[in-house]
């Protein structure tokens, strides 16, 4: 299947559609095959892409037509503006990582690993076993299943030998880390209050902060994390009482804090009487290094720690944990209970089953080897096919390459150009809590077939040349 030929046919037909009246019939597939010298499969792919873009509609047995604008009177929804009032946050819409793509697109925009990298056999067996237990028919404790709480707490000591594990009750089970972030921000920061964040940072944390009314305060962060002195100055200038950060394989940059940076930031947090909200999203995704959570160095409740299993077990098992101590733990638990009451015991039991199976450690080793190979293959394809794009830091873990574009590049136009040619990428703007420091894109190396990476690099390079 020739993706480049399909992209050319799509471009030609889009120009024709723009000039055609609604309801006009496109040339038959047989005509398009002859006209463009393409295979029937390539023509069918082009028509599917046009349909996915909402430009045409196919009527089986009749043909393909320019989509007709509906002539019936549209619903008057203007009353909702008065009822809802002004929005609390600016409208971001759905994230680029969550958008649907046209059929057969090369998907480098996703936030998840490919299905073949996940422990499917373990997950299916665990779900079947959990369905036969009492958890399938009963409610769960608000804080989570005690066995799963104990597992998450024990993982901290296992990651940093020689440290004491948090108490099991200090681990609160949440339906994914996104939900946990919202509760932490509401409980510990609150509407109208400042929250320090790295810049760039995880788009979901930005969204959660905006939805809870928290005021974001960007702190620049580089390949080795933020400058502790910048963090200290930001605390002093704003009176903030919390700093959200990703010390291990940050999304989107892949940055990893050095041990010295971690200790220095913790010292600042302690001195300021503040919280460090540590998002350990990539704990299981180390490639050349392992994550050593900073919460293992905390004995006074300054670190609030989040870890999710969604990326390493299955997107369908949205199970995560927040580890917090003292009054902070009680406030987060109260928020979680008021929002969702409890997490499905069925999902908790299945997740615990997966991570306590003998095959779990084998799965992690295999996944990390595959992530390394995919990272290196995409890096080579990008450097060969798109030399104008620069990956300044090769991530030692995680799922993504963070790439700088030439100055002046219109990021959103580049994203649209790539998508029109069958390549889905994520523009970097949504990872900045304020104005972007430059034009960037994030490329996921874990979600797509590596055999398609060279084609992705070529499409990206051609789009950069046009830009």
Image (cartoon, grey):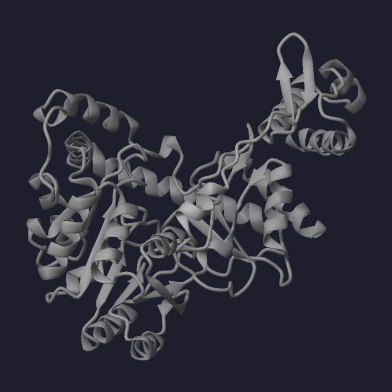
Q: Is residue 449 visible?
A: yes
* 17 relative position to 202: left or right: right
Q: Quadrant of residue 119?
A: top left
Q: Quadrant of residue 129?
A: top left
Q: Is residue 394 visible?
A: no
Q: Quadrant of residue 230?
A: bottom left
Q: Whole-percent x and y of residue 7?
A: 77, 37
* 403 relative position to 159: left or right: right
Which is more toward the observer, 242 or 24? Answer: 24
Which is more toward the observer, 394 or 263? Answer: 263
Q: Please give the name of the residue rendered at 29% of the width and 85% of the height, measured from the top-left corner.
A: 264
Q: Whole-percent x and y of residue 170?
A: 11, 60
| The C terminus: image quadrant | bottom right
Q: Please give the name of the residue rendered at 16% of the width and 64% of the height, measured from the top-left corner.
A: 331
Q: How many numbered circles does the render carry?
A: 0
Q: Is residue 90 above or below residue 56?
A: below
Q: Please give the name of the residue rendered at 31% of the width and 53% of the height, measured from the top-left corner.
A: 179
* 273 relative position to 251: left or right: left
Q: Whole-percent x and y of residue 207?
A: 43, 60
| The N terminus: image quadrant | top right
Seen as rendered, the residue at the extreme right is 35
* 460 relative position to 309: left or right: right
């Amino acid at each position: 299947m020739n993706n480049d030929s399909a992209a050319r046919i799509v471009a030609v037909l889009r120009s024709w559609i723009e000039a055609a009246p609604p309801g006009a019939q496109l040339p038959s597939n047989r005509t398009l095959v002859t006209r463009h010298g393409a295979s029937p499969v390539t023509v069918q792919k082009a028509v599917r892409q046009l349909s996915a873009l909402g430009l045409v509609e196919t009527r089986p047995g009749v043909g393909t037509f320019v989509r007709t604008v509906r002539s019936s009177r549209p619903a008057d929804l203007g009353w909702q503006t008065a009822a809802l009032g002004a929005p609390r946050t600016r409208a971001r819409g759905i994230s680029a990582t969550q958008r649907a793509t046209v059929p057969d697109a090369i998907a480098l925009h996703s936030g998840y690993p490919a299905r073949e990298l996940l422990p499917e056999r373990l997950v299916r067996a665990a779900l079947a076993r959990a369905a036969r237990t009492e958890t399938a028919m009963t409610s769960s404790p608000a804080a989570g299943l005690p066995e799963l709480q104990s597992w998450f707490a024990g993982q901290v000591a296992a990651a940093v030998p020689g440290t004491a594990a948090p108490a099991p009750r200090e681990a609160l089970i949440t339906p994914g880390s996104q939900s946990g972030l919202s509760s932490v921000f509401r409980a510990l920061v609150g509407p109208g209050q400042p929250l320090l964040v790295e810049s760039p940072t995880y788009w979901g944390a930005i969204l959660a902060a905006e939805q809870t009314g928290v005021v974001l305060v960007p702190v620049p962060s580089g390949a080795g994390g933020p400058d502790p002195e910048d963090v200290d100055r930001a605390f002093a200038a704003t009176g903030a009482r919390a700093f959200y950060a990703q010390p291990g394989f940050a999304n989107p940059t892949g940055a990893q804090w050095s041990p010295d940076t971690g200790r220095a930031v913790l010292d600042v947090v302690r001195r300021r009487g503040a919280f460090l909200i540590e998002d350990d999203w990539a704990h299981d995704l180390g490639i050349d290094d392992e994550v050593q959570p900073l919460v293992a160095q905390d004995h006074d409740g300054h670190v609030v720690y989040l870890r999710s299993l969604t990326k390493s077990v299955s997107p369908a098992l949205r199970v995560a944990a927040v580890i917090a101590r003292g009054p902070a733990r009680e406030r987060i638990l109260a928020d979680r209970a008021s929002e969702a009451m409890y997490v499905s015991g069925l999902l908790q039991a299945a997740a615990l089953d997966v991570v306590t199976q003998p095959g779990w450690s084998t799965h992690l080793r295999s996944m990390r080897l595959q992530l390394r190979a995919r990272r290196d293959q995409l890096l080579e394809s990008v450097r060969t096919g798109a030399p104008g794009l620069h990956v300044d830091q090769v991530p030692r873990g995680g799922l993504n390459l963070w790439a700088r574009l030439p100055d002046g590049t219109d990021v959103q136009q580049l994203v649209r150009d790539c998508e029109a040619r069958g390549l889905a990428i994520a523009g970097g703007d949504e990872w900045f809590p304020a104005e972007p420091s430059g034009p960037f894109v994030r490329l996921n190396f874990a979600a797509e077939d590596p055999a398609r990476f060279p084609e992705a690099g070529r499409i990206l390079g051609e789009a950069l040349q046009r830009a």
